[in-house]
Amino acid sequence: MTRQLQYFGRLIRSVFFGAAVGRRRVRAVVPAVLLILVVAGAAVRAPAWAVGALKADKTAVDVLLVRAAEVDRAFEQVDQVYEAEIAPIERVLLHYRDDRTLARRIATSLVREGRRTGLDPELLLAVLLVENPMLEPSARSSAGATGLMQVMPLHAGNWKKCSGDLQQIETNICYGAQIFKSNLNAVKGDIERALLRYNGCVRGTNTPNCGMYPMHVYARAGRASILAKVGPRSAP
């Protein structure tokens, strides 16, 4: 029975002390607690022959202990990624809109799509902040550009990796990243020309001074690099 109690101890530790509280995994904690209580209660009420069977099955217990250790390591890896990549972007976004849930979804999507396309998430962040500094997922321009990355509807369906409504945060950022990556490939890695293409400023006739678009993105990127190092505050 000692080994079973050891396992329950490890499981409880992975739920409560695996950085779960610090990362607001409350939704995951509550069902896990109920599961632990049910299993533990069943163990207490189990007949002697069942307890004996558990004692005999040391291999199964060892496997469960290994799984508990793997859960601990997985939580640690998630926390490391969050602190190193997502949290700095989240801090920047909170300076533009005081909505932590929204900021975390956007930051997570930027990091995910940056990894998928090989683009720096901070570059995608800067483009997003130029296109939609109010961080309004349902924003729509007079030309029909939609969402956080102001994606034109004509792009819908062009990338199988991106699915869903263009106003959905994850879908919109997925399209924005894929469009920018496509533009960057088309101009052989020239970031400024890729930014101009993203803005639709290929010939400079669509909007006045559209040639300044890369400078606006660089300015946002510079500000973001500073804000990422300081604590969040409500946007003015």
Image (cartoon, grey):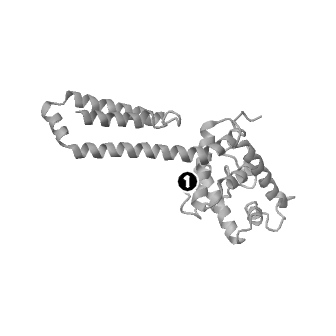
Depth check, front residue: 77 or 92? 77
Q: Quadrant of residue 144?
A: bottom right
For the C terminus, the image quarter is: top right
Residue 129 placement (x, y as % from top left):
73, 48
121 above or below 78? below
Residue 168 in view in this figure: no
- Left or right for 65, reference 171: left
- Left or right for 191, reference 88: right
Q: Secondary structure at mark 1?
A: loop
- Left or right for 62, reference 91: left
Depth check, front residue: 102 or 72? 72
Q: Residue furthest right?
A: 208
- Which residue is painted at 36% across and 36% down in the image? 10
For the N terminus, the image quarter is: top left
Residue 26 placement (x, y as % from top left):
47, 33
Residue 176 placement (x, y as % from top left):
65, 57
Kindly identify which residue carries mark 1: 164
34 above or below 193? above
